Amino acid sequence: MTINITEPKPVSFVVPVVAAAGAFLGIFVGTAHDNTLLGLLGGAVITGLLALIFLTIFRREREARWISVAGFAVIGYLLGGLPGGVIGIAAGWFFGWFIFWLGEGRYRAKLAPYYTPMQVLWHFSFRVICGMIFFFLITPIVVVMPLSFNAENFFTFTPEMLRFAPEGYSLKHYEDFFTNSDWQQALWNSLSIAPAATLLSVGFGTLAAIGLSSEHVPFRRPIMAILISPMIVPLIISAAGMYFFYSRIGLQGTYLGVVLAHAALGVPFVIITVTATLVGFDRSLTRAAANMGANPVTTFFRVQMPLILPGVISGGLFAFITSFDEVVVVLFVGSAGQKTLPWQMFIGLREQISPTILAVATILVGISILLLTTVELLRRRSERLRGMSPG
Amino acid sequence: MSDTTETGPVISADGVPLKKSLRRALRRQKLRALGLIAPLLIFVLIAFVAPILDMLFRSVENQIVSNTLPATVEALQDWDENSGVAPDEPVYKALYFDMFLAAEAKRHTRLGSRLNYEKTGLSSLFRSSGRRVDDLGDDYADAFEDIDPRLTEAGFWFSLMSGEGEKNEDPVASSRRRLSGVADSWLFGEVGFAPSQEITQLLPETTRAYSEFAVFTALVDEDVVAEEDPWEAVYVALALDLANADLSSYSGPGIETLRMAQENLGNLPIVPFKDFFEDIDDDWVDPEYWQTIAVFSPSYTSGYFLNSVDLQKTADGIEVRPENQRIYMMLFQRTMFMSLMITGSCILLGYPVAWILANLPMRTANLLMILVLLPFWTSLLVRTSAWKVMLQQQGVINDTLVWLGLVDDASRLVMINNQFGTIVAMTHILLPFMILPLYSVMQTIPPSYLRAAKSLGATNWTAFWRVYFPQSVPGIGAGSILVFILSIGYYITPEIVGGTTGVFISNRIAYHISSSLNWGLAAALGTILLAVVLILYWAYDKIVGIDNVKLG
């Protein structure tokens, strides 16, 4: 769409930049071997020379990149063993790409041609900053996964794991999760509480959302405020109130009490998603159905329900995950007999530190990826049904 | 009806004025909508709103003192709190019978621990006294047995107290009320005992004590009253009554035995109640302890609220707590400070991400969105445990730093169990709540505005600060309030990564519910927190509107 000029950049610009990047990497390598200055200089010289050679003498990019990867891998392996080698491969790939990306002027390809050098610099620095924030967001979740295969009972990477030695890895924490009666009981409790709570909140919630979205509802705002309140009130306060009140009426420490509490917490999510779906619902469809002689129940199940189903299901998923994830309220309202999975994890984190928690965490991340995909697909389907463009 | 409508109103097909039939249709529609909403509304009111109201009620409720020691509280009305001397004999007499009943119902320790929140030492005082109140009655019972062994027989007592002639139901009814208050639940059922009118007048204290015994035996222990030996307190009451009863005109069952007991009253080891309590513990004649009981005797108290802002209620009015007991203001301040820090770092980290998501091509943006949504969908416990793995001293970050040589192995960074750990972990957990509203606001800002500003000669910074930023402020506002509301009431993450210096007010609430069992204080702290959140929520509603809350 714009005219983009990609022209080779002078060596006098590329080599210092690459050398600076190399020096930055070299600092870490140097510090790890107790000689920061040597690392800094070494990194600058090696990468600078590499850039000079690739851009002036050896201009065949494909081969040059392979050479870079291999060279850095060897240096890394010599300096830091197998993990060093892996980092070396990454560094080699990066420098191979970086040298030609800069040297051929490709970095300008997608930028407006009138950008000043400072703007270009800012553009890429900004991307690096954003990349670091994304890194911050995702790393903790990713780090948990390999650690769950730890052969030791540690929360940290063992030297064997870093050497990628097979004896450093095992499935014993998963085995523990699937055989330990505490964990299995907790899983079973979670799986029996969450669906019941979801059913309650989806059943009542869908009806109420339909009622709320009709044209004339008296006291709409106060009713909405009450129905949304479980989402607004801090969980610890809900938990405290429910603990006091449920122990008065004998529901504290019972399955029913936990289900009721979780259903109440899930209601706002159902209300919000279903009313959002109903905003795009064409009322003339129900009128047409009534006109053709369908009674309200038939109209609801044959006309309205299929159309709002995506919203109902994603509301249900929200309610399910709320209950499945919830720990504060169940901690107070439940007793040992209702110990759910998050509760067991909470105890595990607070008292006995066992990497089984990480195995459970990995399984839960898998489940949340599945749920995320489902909700996203449902959202697109619902928007398509309502004639909106798929996001 | 059609006659009257000739002059004006439009009529619908079935002959009813159109206005009326429209109104009727509208009403039907409203009722239908309300009918659909009603089940959920009732459900939420019972399962959620009622508990919250119960908590509000508990933060001021203080019926335990007047329920457990009703007579004492009444007798204390005549005592001057600021007199500096202990109350007189009537108060101790009332205390004896109240304490005896409470000890039988095993409720005296509960009251002791309640009053211990206000003055240390009262808990052990009540516990030790509860054990000793039986002793006094035992001495009396032994003395009565020496006078006539029949006086300690269950059957004799039952017929003596039942008497002859007209029955009086009042003592049993009031005992039932009294015991229901002590036991904190209404006692149902048949007692199988009622004193006669005459005996009620003749031996008022004994009737009261025996009725309490009868109600307790029949409804709590579920035994037959006539077969159980009376409580020790009944003998004490009898001794009191006999001292000034006129038995000459009474002719009911057991009168000879009673007369004999009255004649031998000198053989009883009668001691004033005040001396008895002083003998148990000197603290009972310490006016300071009585002041505390008197100050906290009303059914409703502001004491819990005062306590939660580091004040205390004394006989001289409201005072600031001693330096070493002030923790709640500090905790509230810390909660506020850390929530602000978390909100600030969420803005700092969320703004660039939202910007880049809003300005990248749709496909790339959707892909990167996964990186935001995945943490959002991942279990809170998973993320918290991940941060524990990352931050601890043998954790991933420290290991990496040591491996890189940036940190010495001996001086690994302490990043967990302090404020830093809580702020980092909670920023990560709450960041999606900042990014999502910011993103949806930034999507609506046309990128051409920025280009227009630049083409008119604005520098990059001016264009951003004067054109783009003001338009994104609603997003910052919405996201900030959301993050702030969420972080102010967080419990799990501070509990796990916060140690002692990184915990919030909510951790203290949980502590009071499950460990110290000071529910009133927990409720008061919760009420204050709730008030703060509701004010913020109101602000959120003004800025964004509740209806505009979107998920995912």
Image (tube, rainbow, N blue to C red):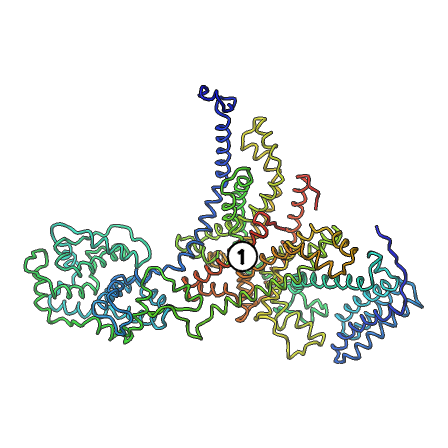
Residue drawn at x 34%, y 67% is B112
The image quadrant of residue B336 is: bottom right
Helix, strand or loop for disc 1: helix
Q: Which residue in the rendered view is the most extreme toward the left?
A: B248
The picture places residue A40, in percent across and down from the top left corner, at 79, 76
Image position of A240 (left or right of B350): left
Q: To which residue does mark 1 refer?
A: B536
A311 and A80: which is toward the camera: A311
A142 and B318: which is toward the camera: B318
Residue drawn at x 53%, y 39% is A211
Subunit under mark 1? B
A122 and B520: which is toward the camera: A122
Image position of B58 (left or right of B371): left
Residue drawn at x 68%, y 39% is A387
Can residue A364 be seen here? The reply is no
Other-residue count near label 1 (Cα within 10 Å), few / some / many at <14 / 14–19 / ≥20: some
Report the amino acid beneath label 1. Leu
Can residue B343 be seen here? The reply is yes
The picture places residue A319, in percent across and down from the top left corner, at 56, 49
Image position of B417 (left or right of A254): right
The picture places residue A284, in percent across and down from the top left corner, at 61, 32
Is B482 above or below relative to A29?
above
